[in-house]
Amino acid sequence: MKKYVQLLLVIVSGALVGVMIFSAYKLITDKLEHKEARVKDSGAATEYSIKQAVSPTPRVYSTETEDAIKLDDEISPLNSMYDLDKFFSDYPDAVAWIYSPSTPIDYGVVEADNNEFYLDHFLDGTRSLSGSLFVDCNCNRDFSSENTVIYGHHMQDGSKFASLVNYTNVNYYREHPIMYLSTRDMNYRVEIFAAYLTDADSDTYTFSFDSPEAYDSYLKRMASQSDFQADVELNSEDHIITLSTCSYEFYDARYVVQGKLVPIH
């Protein structure tokens, strides 16, 4: 009996040591993968950044575009920050670059034919623990959907979309009321109008609407549940983006930030 107990203790001890070794291995490899992901993100920003600072210049649009779309007078800071033509040329899945001043959000955005691939892949298709920011595959690639949804991980190091949850604080909203987004064909100022906790299956993730009235009702409903009140005018002719990241208050919780797309130079 004594030998049996001793053997059992040896087996249990061995199992515990194995678990400890495996846990330490996972901890080390996860840290290395996180570091590698940060290096990749930093490398992308560095590769496409304009080396010599230039004064803001307007983006040149075709006459047809300017005739069709009323542009606000503001000049996008992204014009002088990145060589976006090269970025879009290098990555076929690239659809935008999003930038939130004075926050970690400063990334390229991609879209695949599914919503799984870029959960754990970098812009170039290589494996990456932090994935990429990506547009829901049900949305139009040119952001012409009424509501274009962009997903990003809630990384513990504060990268990707982790900073979105700061919008629970009204003072954070007051300090960061706008973002900027550039697509292949257009620059936008993103006027934040709502941020709130929701469920992954909520009607927040509605991309298109049967009528202007249905869309107008949706916009009012989203704004009404926001953690702050924003002075942003909305109507059924507007296009919006919804930035979505995981939250942990309940199963499948998401924190979303929504903004109106305003075309600019």
Image (spheres, rainbow, N blue to C red):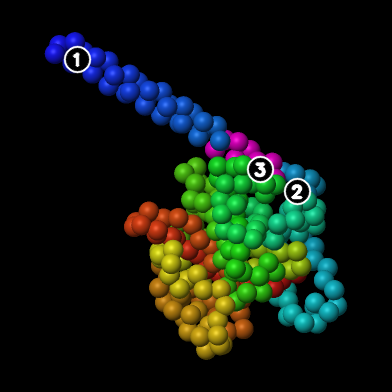
Mark 3 and mark 1: span between their CA atoms?
51 Å
Q: Amino acid at mark 2?
A: Tyr
Q: Is 40 drawn above or below residue 135 in the view shown?
A: above
Q: Is residue 83 left or right of residue 119?
A: right
Residue at image coords 47%, 71%? 204
Q: Nearer the viewer, residue 209 or 244?
A: 209
User: Dots 3 and 2: beta carbons under 8 Å?
Assistant: no
Rendered location of residue 151, percent (x, y): 55, 58
Could you say whether the residue bearing mark 3 is in a helix, strand or loop?
loop
Q: Let me know if residue 39 is in the magenta part.
A: yes
Residue at image coords 67%, 47%? 125
Can the viewer see residue 21 in this picture?
yes
Could you say whether the residue bearing mark 1 is in a helix, strand or loop?
helix
Mark 1 and mark 2: span between their CA atoms?
66 Å
Q: Amino acid at mark 3?
A: Thr
Q: Is 264 drawn above or below residue 19 in the view shown?
A: below
Front tag of 3 and 2? 3
Tag of residue 126 = 3
Residue under pointer 1: 4
Which secondary structure dominates the residues rendered in magenta?
A: helix
First of labels 3, 1 by sequence position? 1
Dividing the image into 4 quarters, which one contains the C terminus? bottom right
Range covered by the magenta-colored residues: 34-44
Q: Is residue 140 left or right of residue 6?
A: right
Rendered location of residue 177, percent (x, y): 54, 65
Q: Amino acid at mark 1?
A: Tyr
Residue under pointer 2: 48
